[in-house]
Amino acid sequence: MGMQESTARRLIDPLGRTIDYVRLSVTDKCNLRCTYCMPENNRDFERRERYLTFAEIERVIRAFSELGVRRVRITGGEPLVRAGIPDLASRLAALPGVDDLSLSTNAVLLANQAEALHGAGIGRLNISLDTLRRDRFRQITGNDDLGRVLDGLQVASRTGFEPIKINMLALRGQNDDEFIDMAEFCIEHGFSLRFIETMPMGTAGRAATDHYLPLSDVKAELASRFDLVPSVMSGGGPARYFRIDGSRTNIGFITPISRHFCDTCNRVRLSVDGTLHLCLGQAHSVPLRPLLRAGIDDEELQNVIVEALKLKPARHEFGEKPEQIVRFMSVTGG
Ligand code: SAM
Ligand code: SF4
């Protein structure tokens, strides 16, 4: 290790957690209205002039990468409703230090953009899909777009993203008879599949707690059908993985509620208005946009980020204080 590297500043919070991952929300808007994420009549969107521009985003991510961040995920809202995401992606992929650029999308607009996104340097893709049934898709998301999502998936898998992970929220009474079907769909197409517990984010997330299902139930059901071999997957996230024996498909379980993973948290979030959120489930945050627009220099920007980490809470409190997070998931960048 060279002198310069050993003395380089790193983002380590007061609890010793190293932050090497930024989740970047490029919009709070969405072309769907998933019941657990965004209320149907939501009008409370950020004003356009308060969006970080691509140049501002690039500056902030450059500062993070100089502080040791290697992974960036573009998310939202639905990132693909903002124009020019392939352009942003190629700017971020070109930053020295950023070696893992990924995208979370609902895939409604993916078919037309998959190639450009892949060409821009996005390697890994997470696609949210809670059901393979058209009527349920309409019920859960408010739109009749399952066909477009499946087209998007098909184009993406031909385009060479590796891996493609399907994210499925386990929703009691809504999709709890489809876990095996979704696993078989993923085996057929060579996708990985991750199950996620519903979190009480915002009014929509709290309303969905009636549908909360602990993933131990999901795992038991899958284990009755498939041989699950403990496995690991790249991505730096909190999922615990198992490979379905005889297939390429990994199944991941993300259990923010039944078994939280805050002690290994490695990430922070940047919302569309340039607010740095230190925890998905807590209010601690630092607004960067006013500083950027007041002409802060690069060194000072790094200092602000290093200082901000001191605010990172030990853990979320979804269990104890489910009422406290008023932001929707689409604002912080789920
Ligand atoms: N629109 C993109 C998508 O759906 O993949 C990216 C943003 S979305 C907010 C990111 C992830 O957050 C999705 O996988 C979604 O299922 C998840 N999500 C939204 N609300 C949630 C909640 N209340 N609890 C758990 N996960 C949630
Ligand atoms: Fe939109 Fe994604 Fe939220 Fe669904 S989960 S409403 S697709 S941001």
Image (cartoon, grey):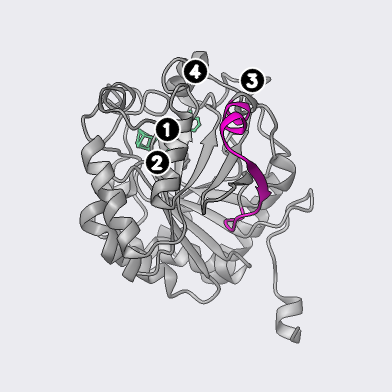
Q: Nearer the viewer, residue 102 or 313?
A: 102
Report the Cα–Cα distance between label 4 and label 1: 16 Å
Looking at the image, is mark 2 or mark 4 earlier in the sequence?
4
Mark 2 lies within 8 Å of ligand 1 (Cβ measured): no
Looking at the image, is mark 3 or mark 2 earlier in the sequence?
2
| Helix, strand or loop status at disc 2 | helix
Which residue is at a point 31% across and 61% down the rendered structure image?
158
Amino acid beneath label 4 = Arg
Which residue is the site of mark 1?
181
Provide residue 110's location: percent of width, then percent of height: 27, 51
Q: Is residue 24 above or below residue 132?
A: below
Write the start and end of the magenta stretch as one range. 218-236
Which residue is at a point 45% across and 46% down the rendered structure image?
187
In contact (CB < 8 Å): disc 2 and disc 1:
yes
| Helix, strand or loop status at disc 4 | loop
Amino acid beneath label 1 = Asp
User: How busy is the neighbourhood of tag 3: few (under 14 within 10 Å), some, or many (20 plus)?
Assistant: few
Q: Nearer the viewer, residue 59 or 96?
A: 96
| Helix, strand or loop status at disc 1 | helix
Which residue is the site of mark 4?
172
User: How busy is the neighbourhood of tag 1: few (under 14 within 10 Å), some, or many (20 plus)?
Assistant: few
Q: Nearer the viewer, residue 52 or 32?
A: 32
Report the Cα–Cα distance between label 4 and label 3: 22 Å
Which residue is at a point 61% across and 29% down the rendered structure image?
224
Q: Is residue 221 magenta?
A: yes
Which residue is the site of mark 2?
185
